[in-house]
């Protein structure tokens, strides 16, 4: 077990958001949350996956929602309702504990990104450790996109909570897709933000169902970014080395657009190379960056990780925050091995965005 200092947690969040591939929650809000917790004299303890006891109950707390503003009708219905002081993920975790009649002994982040701060906050509030692992190795758009799904671990029962005091227990969901619809519907009537705590699992089952060491690797990448900045070095190269990735493109954003499609943020970013004779890079996203194409050439596609970084600072840019004129570096990181299995690719591979699974295999063979 290791008690993390605030600088270590900040490094972890920066790295998690780099692996968050343009989604996974706000880095700014995540940093604000952990800084407030540490200013209160509170800290998170992190344990390795091997330290988790087989008979422990472990669960995944996180936020679900949309960066798009709620509709006027929803806002009118919410007007005047009391606001609770606790974070919604903690409310959901406590509701799940009450339903199961058993205490959660550790929490595991549901993905990498700003949402990782949610797991940190819940671990601190429940006074339990955070596990150095997650079931995605990146940020993902759907609840189905998890190694729990690959390993047939049920998402239910799971709990939902909002800032107004509503809580809900879903005893059984037919599948992960139905769970996604239920959670997003609840978030939609809650002002586009809800807390979820799902995948209650034994420590024994957890060890065979998640990706080991992802938080410490995020911390390593975030530290590399920070140290490069302190030394006056362009951070992208240090980030690529620390994360075992590669530099894909450097240029200026010329077009960035997005819209809310059923609770998902969909859009594209077009980046123009500084060398005028080089074709621009187009990245399409659905909450997270999904595919990068230059002309007719496929450069990257899910489940490989694509991240857009500010050229000077190395900070990851959430896809809705991309703006014309930004000078950026595009980097990629290998997909965790679980996503490269046939079952992994069937859940979160090119077919998810309407393309052929073979595209990923062909791209890998050519790289």
Image (cartoon, rainbow, N blue to C red):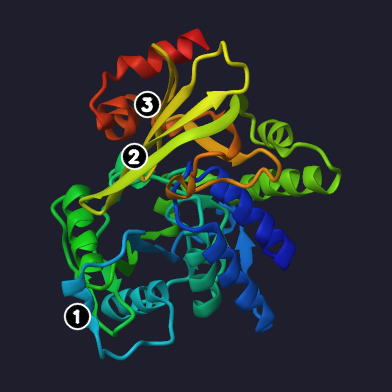
Residue that carries the numbered disc 3 in the rendered image: 341
Pair 3/2: label in front = 2
Please, what secondary structure does the residue beneath circle 3 have? loop
Name the quarter where the N terminus is drawn: bottom right
In the displayed structure, 356 sits above or below 344; it is above
Q: Residue at x 61, y 28 (%)?
A: 245
Q: Of the residues under marks 1 and 3, which one precedes in the sequence?
A: 1
For the residue pair 92 and 6, the one nearer the viewer reads as 6
Badge 3: residue crowd in 10 Å (few <14, some 14–19, many ≥20) = few
Residue that carries the numbered disc 2 in the rendered image: 267
Q: For the residues marked 1 and 3, what is the alpha-carbon distance in whole angstroms?
A: 47 Å
Badge 2: residue crowd in 10 Å (few <14, some 14–19, many ≥20) = many
Residue 88, given in percent of the width and then of the height, sits at 38, 75
Q: Residue at x 34, y 44 (%)?
A: 258
Q: Quadrant of residue 159?
A: bottom left
For the residue pair 177 and 322, the one nearer the viewer reads as 322
For the residue pair 196 and 287, the one nearer the viewer reads as 287
Residue that carries the numbered disc 1 in the rendered image: 76
Pair 1/3: label in front = 1
Please, what secondary structure does the residue beneath circle 1 have? helix
Q: Residue at x 62, y 48 (%)?
A: 15
Residue 115, given in percent of the width and then of the height, sits at 47, 59
Q: Of the residues under marks 3 and 2, which one precedes in the sequence?
A: 2
Q: For the residues marked 3 and 2, what is the alpha-carbon distance in whole angstroms?
A: 28 Å
Residue 106 as seen in the image, left or right of residue 311 = left
Query: How many numbered markers are drawn?
Result: 3
């Amino acid at each position: 077990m290791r008690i993390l200092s605030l600088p270590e947690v900040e490094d972890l969040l920066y790295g998690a958001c780099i692996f968050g591939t343009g989604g996974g929650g706000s880095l700014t809000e995540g940093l604000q949350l952990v800084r407030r917790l540490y200013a209160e004299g509170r800290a998170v303890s992190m344990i390795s996956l091997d330290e988790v006891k087989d008979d422990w109950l472990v669960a995944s707390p996180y936020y679900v929602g949309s960066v798009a503003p709620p509709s006027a009708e929803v806002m009118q219905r919410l007007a005047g309702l009391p606001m609770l002081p606790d974070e919604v993920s903690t409310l959901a975790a406590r509701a799940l504990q009450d339903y199961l009649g058993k205490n959660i002994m550790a929490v595991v982040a549901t993905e990498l990104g700003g949402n990782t701060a949610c797991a940190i906050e819940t671990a601190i509030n429940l006074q339990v450790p955070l596990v150095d692992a997650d079931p995605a190795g990146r940020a993902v758009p759907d609840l189905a996109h998890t190694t729990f799904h690959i390993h047939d671990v049920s998402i239910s029962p799971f709990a939902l909570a909002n800032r107004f005091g509503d809580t809900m227990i879903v005893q059984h969901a037919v599948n992960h897709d139905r769970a996604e619809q239920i959670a997003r519907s609840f978030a939609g009537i809650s002002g586009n933000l809800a807390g979820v705590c799902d995948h209650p699992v034994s420590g024994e089952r957890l060890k065979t169902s998640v990706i080991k060491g992802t938080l410490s690797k995020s911390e390593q990448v975030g530290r590399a970014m920070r140290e490069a900045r302190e030394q006056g070095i362009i951070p992208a190269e240090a980030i690529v080395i620390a994360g075992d990735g590669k530099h894909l493109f450097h240029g200026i954003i010329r077009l960035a657009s997005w819209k809310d499609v059923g609770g998902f943020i969909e859009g594209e970013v077009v980046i123009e190379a500084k060398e005028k004779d080089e074709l621009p890079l187009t990245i399409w996203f659905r909450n997270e960056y999904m595919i990068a194409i230059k002309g007719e050439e496929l450069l990257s596609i899910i489940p490989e990780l694509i991240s857009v970084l500010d050229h000077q600072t190395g900070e990851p840019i959430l896809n809705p925050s991309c703006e014309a004129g930004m000078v950026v570096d595009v980097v990629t990181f290998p997909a965790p091995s679980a996503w490269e299995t046939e079952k992994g690719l069937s859940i979160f591979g090119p077919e998810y965005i309407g393309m052929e699974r073979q595209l990923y295999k062909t791209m890998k063979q050519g790289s």
